[in-house]
Amino acid sequence: MIDDRTPAPCVVLGGCGFIGANLTAALAQAGHEVRCFDRFDPPAWAAPAQDVRFIKGDAEEPERLEQAMRGAEICFHLMSTTIPKTSNDDPIYDATSNLVSSLRVLESCRAHGVRKIIFLSSGGTVYGQARYTPIDERHPTHPLCAYGVTRLTIEKYLHMYHALHGLDYCVLRAANPYGPGQNPRSAQGAIGVFLGRMLNGETIDIWGDGSVVRDFLYIQDLVRALMLAIDHQGPTRLFNIGSGAGCRLNTLLDELAQATGRRPRTRRHPARAFDAPVNVLDISAARAGLNWAPTISLPTGLRLTWEWLRARNLNREDGP
């Protein structure tokens, strides 16, 4: 449980995305003053919160960024202009748009006396090929995509700013999040995309033979970890956040059939070089250091996501 300290003013960078909108709503509900900073408008499914101030812009607009940062104590950095699947198409853009923007964020945090920055890194990409599983935080980091390289580099800059300037930070290397609010038309997020296609009777694309193992994490479990990071203290500032178990894609298809009562139709493609065969995170450090553990099982999470998606019918009505 989160303690009863006075809620801190927070800014959520990338607060209109799937994770950001869920986090923003939870922070507001917990009594925090929240600023949501994003290039995009809030999603149609996100109910407006009285204590949330939306500021439209990106980190390349200094005045907008300063407006978002001024007076904030906690900064959640969820921004990204790329996704793992496409980042290798233009690694120069990935680095210039994400790394340079993150440095601007760090400089702004320092200038405005932000107490702590909480960075959502990528447990699915920073490690690369698994030498052993489950993957703990000491596992070698050899990303296979530019997205993972950039996330890892931002982590190193956070350490540098802490050592040189005293900016506190916490890094959460998250598994593959899913749940209500995920855009079924997005280019990432297997579960959201698969359920969206099943809702419309469309075919699901599977890359490889379906033996790839992934770690799927329900969105509210991830949000809870992000919020627990606000008051976390101690020398450990890096935590894996996952479900604690792996799931083969072929097994996921069976679970989707159970959750929806429909048998998914699939189309198979050759495996992709950047897809690591296995990625399952060891979450022991988060259990001990954050007093966090996942609470929603995959079958329950799939059912909740399917029910939400059917009720909203995002593909036909109110958009992402």
Image: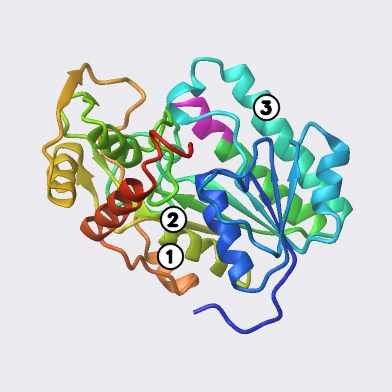
Observer-nearest of 184 and 221: 184
Residue 80 placement, left or right of 244? right
In the rendered structure, which disc, 3 or 1, sits on the residue that comes first in sequence?
3
Say which quarter of the image contains residue 97. Answer: top right
Q: Tell me where the magenta segment starts and ends, as one range.
A: 145-150
Task: Tell me the residue that label 1 is attached to.
Answer: 285
Asked if residue 85 is positioned above or below residue 213 in the image, the reply reads above
**What is the image's colouring?**
rainbow
In the rendered structure, which disc, 1 or 2, sits on the residue that comes first in sequence?
2
Q: Secondary structure at mark 2?
A: strand
Q: Is residue 43 magenta?
A: no
Q: Amino acid at mark 1?
A: Ala
Q: Amino acid at mark 2?
A: Asn
Task: Tell me the residue that label 2 is attached to.
Answer: 240
- How far is disc 1 from disc 2 in space, using C-alphas? 7 Å
Q: Amino acid at mark 3?
A: Ser
Residue sitting at x 14%, y 43%: 251
Q: Residues within 10 Å of mark 1 (few under 14, many from 20)?
A: some
Residue 204 image point, x, y percent: 23, 27
Q: Is residue 147 magenta?
A: yes
Residue 302 image point, x, y percent: 26, 52
In front: label 2 or label 3 = 3
- How far is disc 3 from disc 1 in space, using C-alphas? 31 Å
Task: Tell me the residue that label 3 is attached to.
Answer: 97
Q: Secondary structure at mark 1?
A: helix
